[in-house]
DNA sequence: CTTGAACTGTTCGATGTCGAACAATACGAT
DNA sequence: ATCGTATTGTTCGACATCGAACAGTTCAAG
């Protein structure tokens, strides 16, 4: 069951044409994506899937909070915001957030209160328990991040965070074009 | 590269009571995630969701190939590989890949051929049409990536790609621990 | 040869997210 | 006041992915 392979990384991606790319020569490691390998979007997706899955699996017994930790962290920093705004912040749809908040509320982590100036909207808040759970999970998340970025210099991590910020901004800025 | 909103990061988690954290002061822009904001995993997820969605929407009329371009690119670079290995490469489950290949095959992009040495497994190949479609979509994907990374220096992009590679390697290396 | 473990593709039920609708509410223009 | 339009939360059906099971096959150990 153990994967006794030393992780031969640094695939060079420079195989200009697709054709007789390999004859069993690459049997050892993970398959690269050829041309798409130098693309941010592709690596972004792969890394995200793996990171998200690992985090959720590691904290499987803690309910559904780990999956929605991002949302919970936003609520903690901005208590009382409307569901629409929260959905926008985590890039999910308003309709999806309904179910999610139902679950989190049922687990006793969040709370909907009618907004005082607008009878349409609810403000969303963390409960006491929610505060505690989020704080604990944020610590876990820091550990998780340390594992993700093992072997990477602090400067490069900083750069990556800045790049991701800009990517997000680019995508949010002109979504119509 | 500077964000319009400095968003006093390094939230210190010690805002004892939830209450008047902000009074409409942050009404203008997207809500940040406070403590989680400095975490790779969070930004990774946000960026990926937005990037994936934008790409898929832009190419909505081209069938389901855009969504599975990563997979198709791998098949192009490594024709004839088994479904299991492909699933592993894109970090999806074997069972998920069955449906996906059904769809792609039905759209005439891929093809399953029985593997010559092993009666259990299929080799997966691109059809002629598949080759053409993938090539065209890879060009689109490059354009898309250029949009994502507008305003970011080449060196920083390079760094980010390397960091993502390492993150992926870290996650794949010891998945059992 | 035989046998048991491991692997391959597959099916099936469960869950999560989406898009399109909808009623209730807000609000600006007339 | 009164429209028309926008927004908010919600419901509902469609679809994607998952995990657990399964039969068929490989292969090493005995």
Image (tube, coloured by chain):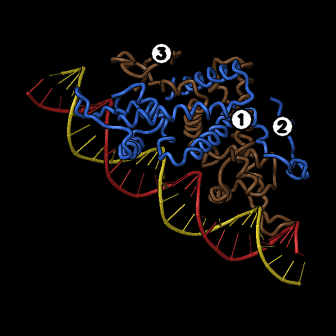
Chain colours: A brown, B blue, C red, D yellow
Callout 2: SS: loop
Number of the front mark, 1 or 2: 2
**Residue A104 vertical position relative to residue B129 in the rendered view, above or below:** below
Which residue in the protein does label 3 denote?
A6
Nearest the viewer among A79 and A31 is A31
Decide which of A101, B99 is in the foreground and name it: B99
Query: Which x, y percent locates residue B20?
Result: 90, 51
**Quadrant of the image containing the N terminus of chain B:** top right
In terms of secondary structure, where does tag 1 sit? helix
B140 left or right, relative to A114:
left
The answer for how far apart the CA atoms under marks 1 and 2 are is 14 Å
Chain for numbered disc 2: B
Structural distance between the alpha carbons of marks 2 and 3? 39 Å
* Residue at image coords 60%, 48%: A63
Classify mark 2: residues with Cα within 10 Å, few (<14), some (14-19) or many (20+): some
Q: Residue at x 34, y 32 (%)?
A: B125
Q: Which mark is residue B11?
A: 2
Residue B156: % across, % down: 71, 21
Q: Is B149 on the left or on the right of B30, as rendered?
A: left
Give the residue at mark 1. Answer: A139
- Asked whether the residues under marks 2 and 3 belong to the same chain, the reply is no
Q: Which label was assigned to residue A128?
A: none
Q: Secondary structure at mark 3?
A: loop
């Amino acid at each position: 069951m153990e994967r006794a392979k030393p992780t031969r990384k640094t695939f060079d991606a420079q195989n200009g044409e697709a054709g007789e790319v390999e004859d069993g020569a690459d049997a050892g490691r993970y398959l690269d994506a050829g041309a798409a390998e130098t693309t941010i979007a592709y690596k972004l997706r792969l890394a995200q899937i793996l990171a998200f899955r690992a985090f959720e699996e590691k904290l499987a017994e803690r309910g559904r909070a780990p999956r929605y930790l991002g949302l919970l962290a936003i609520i903690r920093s901005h208590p009382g915001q409307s569901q629409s705004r929260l959905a926008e912040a985590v890039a999910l749809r308003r309709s999806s957030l309904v179910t999610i908040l139902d679950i989190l509320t049922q687990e006793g982590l969040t709370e909907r209160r009618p907004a005082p100036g607008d009878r349409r909207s609810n403000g969303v808040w963390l409960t006491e328990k929610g505060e505690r759970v989020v704080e604990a999970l944020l610590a876990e998340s820091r550990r998780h991040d340390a594992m993700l970025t093992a072997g990477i210099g602090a400067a490069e991590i900083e750069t990556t965070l800045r790049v991701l910020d800009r990517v997000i901004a680019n995508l949010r800025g002109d979504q119509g074009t």
